[in-house]
Amino acid sequence: MECKTPTCKICVIKKHKSHDFAEIKESTEGIKAEVKMVIDMKMRNLQSKIADINQGTHTYQADVQKVIQAIKEEGRHLKEMIDKKVEGLINTVKEKDTRNVKTLQSVGNELKTALDKAKEQQKFYQDTQGIKDTTKLLQKLKQIKSQIDQIEEIQIPIMPSVKYAKKTVAEGEIGKLFGELTFGETVKKEENPKPKENVRVRRTAKQYRYSCYECRNPPYK
């Protein structure tokens, strides 16, 4: 029992005289039970860890999908806000453009009307070249001058202008618009942890073909 080895009748006397002994069949049954228990414990432990890995993988992948969905939703929301801002800026430009163009067209139409009146008086002035009567010519010229003076002086408005100053946005600034992405680890604590041991069963059924590792004599019956 002390040396934990099968012995023959010779070695019992020579080397193991003061030791305690047990029947080899009993020892074999005990070791068989021990080995079976160790195997069962190891298998249960491994199966439990496999189940934990599978469950953890499933949970983790579910979390990954939730995170991806959340990022997409946030990105979609930011895109909607950007699209809304872009649309608002464009509408502002178009509305201002409509008002300014309307004003310019109105002034342009007034100027065209005044030009038509001036052209009309120009034609009258040209017609006076054929008048020989000085009195009639003088009256006609005064009449033309009066009509010219009645044409209102139209001031050209300050021409409108529009510019857009682009804002340089760094990639880091865009990142601030999103939430924070973190990765972590979930550690499962074992219940009643036991110290790690390298359990190696060196004895096998084949080794019991001999009674003693020293003399290798056949078993005594």
Image (cartoon, rainbow, N blue to C red):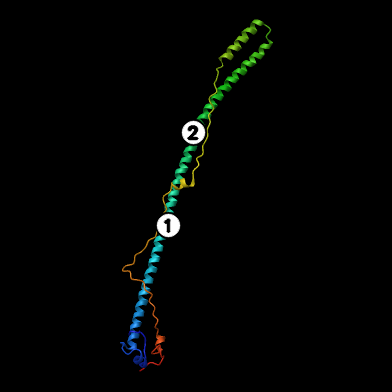
Camera-near label (1 vs 2) is 1
Q: Which residue is mark 1?
A: 65
Taking depth in this image into account, of 144 and 6 the one nearest to the observer is 6
Crowd around label 1: few <14 · some 14–19 · many ≥20 (10 Å): few
Q: Residue at x 49, y 32 (%)?
A: 96
The image position of residue 152, as x and y in percent, is: 55, 17
Q: Quadrant of the N terminus?
A: bottom left
Q: In the rendering, at what x and y percent does residue 54 appear?
A: 40, 66
Asked if residue 41 lies left or right of residue 87, the reply is left
Asked where in the image residue 17 lies, by quadrant, the reply is: bottom left
Residue sitting at 38 percent across and 64 percent down? 55
- Label 2: few (<14), some (14–19) or many (≥20) C-alpha neighbours in 10 Å: few
C-beta proximity under 8 Å, tags 1 and 2: no
Q: In terms of image quadrants, where is residue 221?
A: bottom left
Judged from the image, the secondary structure of the residue bearing numbered disc 2 is helix
Disc number placed over residue 12 in the picture, else none: none
Which residue is located at x 34 percent, y 81 percent?
33
Please determine whether, in this image, residue 33 is positioned above or below residue 12.
above
Give the residue displayed 36% in from the left and 76% down from the top. Answer: 40
Which residue in the rendered view is the most extreme toward the top?
135
Count numbered badges in the picture. 2
Is residue 101 or residue 191 the one in the foreground? 191
The answer to whether 183 is drawn above or below residue 217 in the figure is above
Mark 1 or 2, nearer chain start:
1
**What percent of the width, then of the height, locates residue 120?**
62, 17
Q: Identity of the amino acid at label 1?
A: Gln
Depth order, front residue of 65/10 = 10
The amino acid type, in three-letter code, at marker 2 is Glu
Q: Secondary structure at mark 1?
A: helix
Q: CA distance from mark 1 to mark 2?
A: 44 Å
Q: Which residue is mark 2?
A: 95
Placement of 62 over or under 98, stated as above or below = below
